[in-house]
Amino acid sequence: MPSFHPDETLLIELTAGQLDQATALVIAAHIEVCEECQKKSAVYASLAAEFLEQSDDTPCGEEILQALLSKLPEQQQNTPKIKLMPHQEDFYPQTLNDFLAAFPPQKSWQQVGGSLRQLPLAKGFNGATCKIMGVKAGHTIPKHTHKGDEFVLVLQGGLSDHRGTLRRGDFIYSDATVEHTPVAEMGEECICLVVTHGKLKFTGAFGRVLNWIS
Amino acid sequence: MCKNVYETITETPENNPALLIARVANNQDKQAFVILFKSYAPKLKSWLLKGGASPNIAEEIIQETFLTLWQKAPLFNPEKASVATWIYTIARNKKIDKLRQEHYPELIVEIASDGTHNPDTKKDVRKALKVLNAEQFTVIYKNFFEGQTHQEIAKQEGVALGTVKSRARLALKKLHAVLDISE
Ligand SMILES: [Zn+2]
């Protein structure tokens, strides 16, 4: 069970459809692996559904129903288990693999310095960007601050900063007030799903070099 | 001129929504599909119009929602969600797809098996909503159903953002207490 969770507001915004697709992806991927957040989201979704059931009726034209009846598609009997497509991984939450299937990445993995690699995914309507990031086992991400909000979901390995150690399923939020120097745990590469609103700003001496390339 | 097909539908075992979905799934039962359409499409339309969709776009979203409902009926699991919740989430994603050209993830719920999603949740949610005062209810309603942000609600209600946030916080606290989920 994860020990770091998105706050309630994010779960509600997901339910209400207010998040951009990049942020929605990382929150939904956390929910998939977190029982606690699943329970909360289920309640939020049933609130929305209750309001829908109590809603007034606005008639739809009969022709809509007739049009539907004339083109009913074949039904889907089960979710097809297909073999992994490029960039999908069996340890990724299904939410992420579904996203990768629907929107294959336009670029390939990019190496950033000696410790980091990243695979850019989608952009959100509000400028948020989403990527999968890998940090080599035991390596450090130079000290940095954030221009805007950053959401991180750990998918493999572990990542520590002054707030604790994040492992698979853990979700953490950093805003402009957070300056940190995350370190990947020993053992295996730490793979995260990262959403940023605004670029990272590296603050250490070595980090300045990274500002140029990231 | 077309006849009005939206006569009132009374709740009987024959039109229990979960059974209707089962009939769609097991027998490709078009009659069950029509009953579902007649119960939910007009509600979805109200919701979509409130959310700023034009009547034409609203009807397109409704069509896509019901095509998906037909297609995925065999995958519907009544132990994981109520029919209304399922329809709401399909329609919400179609709406985002249509209005913003964004791909919203489908929630994959595999873990919870302790009855959180059982049909009683509906009764509990109704009970929980009763404990909210009018101001708290408004914030929750606009936030969840109309999809408005706290800023938008503050502007509409003519109150400070902080006031909306504290109303929302109190409302959620009450809801959590009744529904017995930890914060
Ligand atoms: Zn969680």
Image (spheres, coloured by chain):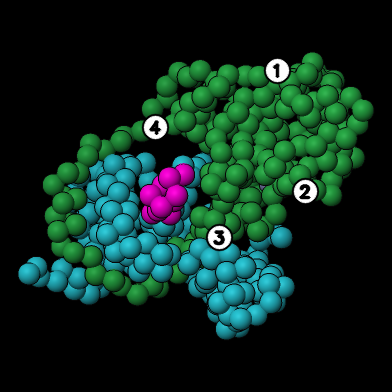
Image coords of residue A156 (percent x, y) = 70, 26
Disc sitting over residue A175 in the figure? 2
Circle 3 residues within 10 Å: few <14, some 14–19, many ≥20: many
The chain identifier of the residue carrying mark 3 reads A
Q: Secondary structure at mark 1?
A: strand
Report the Cα–Cα distance between label 1 and label 3. 40 Å
Circle 4 residues within 10 Å: few <14, some 14–19, many ≥20: few
First in sequence: mark 4 vs mark 3: 3
Report if residue A33 is visible in the image: no
How many circles with numbers are drawn on the protein? 4
Residue drawn 73% across the image and 20% down it: A112
Disc 3 residue type (three-letter): Tyr
Q: What color does chain A have in the rendering?
A: green
Check mark 1 vs ligand 1: CB closer than 8 Å? yes or no: no
Q: Please check the rendered image and state whether residue B94 is part of the magenta-colored stretch, yes or no.
A: yes
Circle 1 residues within 10 Å: few <14, some 14–19, many ≥20: some
The lab-note entry on whether marks 4 and 1 share a chain reads yes
Residue at the disc numbered 4:
A79
Residue at the disc numbered 1:
A111
Q: For this view, does B175 lie left or right of residue A97? A: right
Residue at the disc numbered 3:
A44
User: Residue B72 appears in which quarter of the rendering?
Assistant: top left
Q: Secondary structure at mark 3?
A: helix
Report the Cα–Cα distance between label 3 and label 2. 25 Å
Q: What color does chain B have in the rendering?
A: cyan
